Image (cartoon, coloured by chain):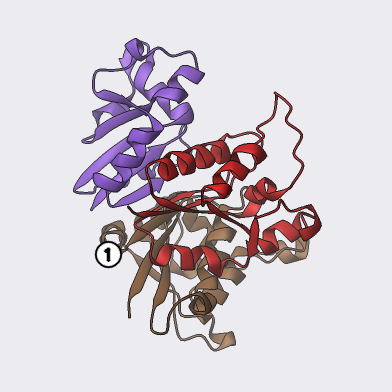
Chain colours: A brown, B purple, C red
Amino acid sequence: MATTKLGFIVQRPPYKSENPKLALTHAIATQSVEVYLNEGDMVTADIAFIGDGVLNCKKDQKAMDYYGLTSTDQHIKMALLVDINIWVCKEDLEKFGLSEDDLVLDAEEFGADMTVNVVPYSEISKKMEEMNHLLFF
Amino acid sequence: MKLAVFVSDYRMTVDTLDRLSPEKMGIILVQNGVYHATLKENGTPSSILNKSAEFYALKEDLETRGLDTSMVDSKVKVITLGELVDLMFNDYEKTAWI
Amino acid sequence: MGKLTIGCFASLVGSLNLDFAVKLSAAAIEKGHTVDLWVSGNGTMLSIKDQRPFKDYSHLEKPLKELMAKGLTVTACEACAEARGYNKDVTMEGFKRHSMDWYLASTFDADRVLHIGGE
């Protein structure tokens, strides 16, 4: 029995490139990865939003209304629903004049127990050390 | 953490590289990243080369852009793809393409 | 010898990221390593068969087929491909199509993972 830990680092803002959305959809795919693995083996994906990437976490996005696309905040809610750890860099939020109140922080309406964690970059850096592999989006 | 960071652009759109601080870092200059190894804007080498890291530039990406290995900064080692594979497996544990 | 998993999300034409991924795969296989190559997003363009080799566009079907014959496993994100109209009928022989969990599973026993994001 073993676990491979992946750290997804999202460093780009939403909608201009597919990177942030693909980070979230790939991370969410960890819920079905076991079909390829031996019993007891696991792959986990934790997501950190840093730099311009923190803009993905803004709440009340309306991409569905204007483009017919699932918005990034909805993907974040789905990620919380499948118990993915999500960290958002505190310093980068503050740089943009944003606070926790501006972010999608939970998915209570779907019954998710997990919440988004706003943490200093030093904590994200520490988490990166703990991961087996890093994937930058 | 021993981290091999791939830099493939000359003008970076993210500042992630400035924030990485692994115990050991290798900066692999590929594609347009190789300009960091050769250009001196207004006479000054790329600030990337001031980082605490080992530097490598991919030979074929230099030559693709008409850059001779003699133009490469002395801090940078010119490597082949095969040598890059060896670096990835033998000298670093994780990679980051930023 | 080890296992290298490469993910590439960039399109076939333009950035040369897929060219790099295929060349790196070749170099790793040459050294005796096992390589899994996953393409997602615009990278699924790589999976289309019958690419006509113009000199002005990256064309990787030939080297890819040679690498597959040497053991390269290359897989496209099925949803990403279908979303772009790259259905099974136009997929190169030997090119696998799976959901995103395949990529994650490939990293499980990989010694190194290189994730090359999209443009």
Q: How busy is the neighbourhood of tag 1: few (under 14 within 10 Å), some, or many (20 plus)?
A: some
Residue A124 appearing in the image: yes
Can you tell which quarter of the image residue C74 is in? bottom right
Foreground: C42 or C39?
C39
In the picture, residue B71 is in which quadrant? Answer: top left
Which residue is located at x 52 percent, y 78 percent? A31
Q: Height in image: A69 above or below B33?
A: below
**Looking at the image, residue B80 lies above or below residue A94:** above
Counting from the top left corner in percent of width and height, residue A60 is at: 62, 68
Please name whichever residue, B40 or C7, is drawn nearer the observer in this view of the structure. C7
Residue C46 in the figure: left or right of residue B53: right
Badge 1 amino acid: Glu
> x, y percentage for residue B7?
41, 36
Quarter of the rendering occupied by the C terminus of chain C: top right
At horizontal 39% and vertical 16% (from top left) the residue drawn is B39
- Give the SS element for disc 1: helix
Closest to the observer: A94 or C52?
C52
The residue that label 1 is drawn on is: A130
Q: Is residue C40 left or right of residue C72?
A: right
Chain designation of label 1: A
Single out the residue that lies furthest toward the bottom: A111
Q: Is residue A74 left or right of residue A45?
A: right
Q: Position of residue C65 (x, y in %)?
A: 62, 44
> Quadrant location of residue B68?
top left
How far across and down, in percent of the image, does residue C72 sit?
52, 51
